[in-house]
Image (cartoon, rainbow, N blue to C red):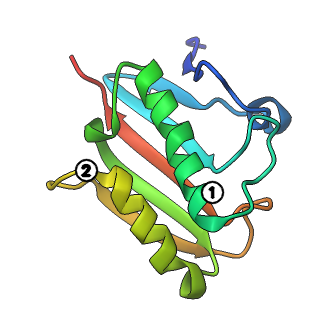
């Protein structure tokens, strides 16, 4: 088996070990980033929705930076949200702070019933700079 090229952010939170997953895997010029939530260092959820979304993006950006990348290199995005009817507008307003200028990455947004105590999760694939 090939050894996975795992990327850990410098200040990783407890969820990676607790739930046994890697934050990101570098493979063939791409970075596959696991879903990031608004987790504090101890793994607990940030209770305020806008702050939780900002923290999820901060966690995502830390992983991208550790791989020598940024959100500008993201080509595909999947967003998960609990109760999108009541939370989508807030989430999308905050996401715009991080989204950058057009052309935008692709995005798939899904309403889900459970995110282990979180309301928002973002998963991306980024093309790594040469």
Residue at position x 79%, y 33% in the image: 14
- Which residue of the protein is positioned furthest toward the left in this rendering? 103
Query: What residue would you read off at disc 1?
Result: 52
**56 horizontally vs 21: left or right:** left
Identified at 35% across, 29% down, the residue is 30
Q: Can you give x and y, in whole percent of width and height, for residue 120 in the image?
A: 60, 62
- The image quadrant where one finds the N terminus is top right
**Residue on which disc 2 sits:** 100
Above or below residue 73? Residue 117 is: below
Q: Quadrant of the C terminus?
A: top left
Residue at 72%, 61% in the rendered image:
118
Q: Nearer the viewer, residue 52 or 24?
A: 52
Query: Quick one: 112 or 94, which is closer to the camera?
Result: 94
The mark that comes first in sequence, 2 or 1, is 1
Using the image, determine if residue 89 lies above or below residue 106: below
Q: CA distance from mark 2 to mark 1?
A: 19 Å
Q: Residues within 10 Å of mark 1 (few under 14, many from 20)?
A: many
Residue drawn at x 22%, y 55% is 104
Marks 2 and 1 in Cβ contact (< 8 Å):
no
**Label 2: element kind:** loop
Question: To which quarter of the image does residue 113 belong?
Answer: bottom right
Q: Position of residue 117 (x, y in %)?
A: 79, 62
In percent of width and height, residue 52 lies at 63, 57
The secondary structure type at the circle numbered 1 is helix
What x and y, as percent, mark residue 101?
18, 53
């Amino acid at each position: 088996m090939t050894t996975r090229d795992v990327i850990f952010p410098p200040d990783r939170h407890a969820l990676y070990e607790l739930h046994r997953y890697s934050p990101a895997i570098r493979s063939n010029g791409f970075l596959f980033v696991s879903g990031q939530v608004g987790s504090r260092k101890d793994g607990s959820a940030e209770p305020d929705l806008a702050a939780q979304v900002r923290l999820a993006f901060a966690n995502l950006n830390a992983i991208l930076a550790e791989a020598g990348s940024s959100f500008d290199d993201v080509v595909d995005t999947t967003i998960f949200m609990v109760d999108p009817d009541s939370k989508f507008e807030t989430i999308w307003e905050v996401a715009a702070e991080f989204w950058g200028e057009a052309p935008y990455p692709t995005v798939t947004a899904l309403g889900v019933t459970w995110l282990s105590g979180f309301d928002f999760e973002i998963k991306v694939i980024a093309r790594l700079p040469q």
